[in-house]
Image (cartoon, rainbow, N blue to C red):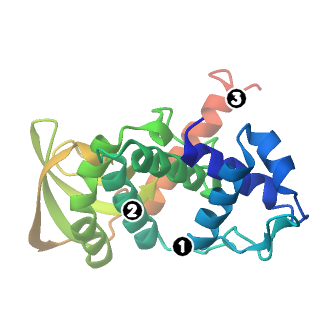
Amino acid sequence: MRRADRLMQLVQILRDGSLHRAQDLAAAVGVSLRSIYRDMETLAASGVPISGERGVGYHVTAAITLPPLNLTLTEVEALHLGLSAVGAAEDADLAQAARQLLAKLDAVMPENPASAPAHGFAIYPFADAARGFQHLPRLRQAVRTRQKLALTLQGEDRTMRPLQLEYWGRLWTCVVWCEKRRDFDLIRVDQITALRVLPSLFVAEAGKSLNDYKARRKDGDSQSATGPSGRK
């Protein structure tokens, strides 16, 4: 067992708040008493709130888990960007830790699994997901100010009205009205190869608004549930 893994296992044992003798900890992780003494010193120096001494035992004196956090979408974006960078690092331990943190973040995001696209977004590669981050500031601004965008998406140039950004566990999508195709589309931000904000603005028009998109999607879900005959 790597020392980093052993330290994590010791933290998991100690977090119950009980007093644990050094010999019991040594037996639990399969090392000598001397190693346990060094491990306790390392954990304490790392900021883990451990109290105790040799011959008595050790226990954690405070919670070592974060309290619940209320994050904005921008904060989630920043967190994913940082974890993506660390996940691509050459340090194997740091890269693995970043992946574990991101998996925990994905697990607690308030996502509706029934409505999420079946593209495996939650396990999408870090490098692919990170490509889309560069476009998010301009996309957010364009959604707020209702500015049209000139996008290159999978080799095709299109003019679009950005209506809403959505988060799907690491990847972002954008609901748009495509003026070239004259229809709604749900585009993946990581597949945008070029983005330019146009000076022209758009206004809400019947049949082209976000509410129209949601109504169409709701109707489509209802038809899928009842089937072509209209019977469940």
Q: Is residue 67 left or right of residue 217?
A: right
Kindly identify the amino acid type of the residue bearing the numbered disc 2: Gln
Q: Please rate how many residues cluster around mark 3, counting C-alpha atoms within 10 Å: few if below 14, some from 14 to 19, many from 20.
A: few
Which three-letter amino acid code belongs to the residue tagged 3? Thr
- Tell me what residue is drawn at x 57 percent, y 43 percent: 219
What x and y, as percent, mark residue 103? 55, 47
**Left or right of residue 18, residue 193 in this image:** left
Judging by the rendered image, the residue that carries numbered circle 3 is 226
Residue 216, image x, y percentages? 49, 47
Could you tell me residue 152's position as x and y percent? Answer: 12, 46
Query: In what quadrant of the picture does the C terminus appear?
Result: top right
Instruction: Tell me which amino acid carries mark 1.
Output: Leu
Residue 5 horizontal side relative to residue 198, left or right: right
Query: Along the line of sight, which residue is nearer the eye, 156 or 216?
Result: 156
CB of mark 1 within 8 Å of CB of mark 3? no
Mark toward the start of the polypeptide (1 vs 3): 1
Number of the label disc, if any, that sits on residue 71: 1
Location of residue 212 in the rendering, given as x and y in whole percent from the top left corner: 45, 56
Relative to 156, residue 74 above or below: below
- Look at the numbered disc 2 and give the secondary structure of its residue: strand
Would you name the residue on which mark 2 appears?
164
Q: Measured along the vertical axis of the image, is residue 200 above or below residue 105?
A: below
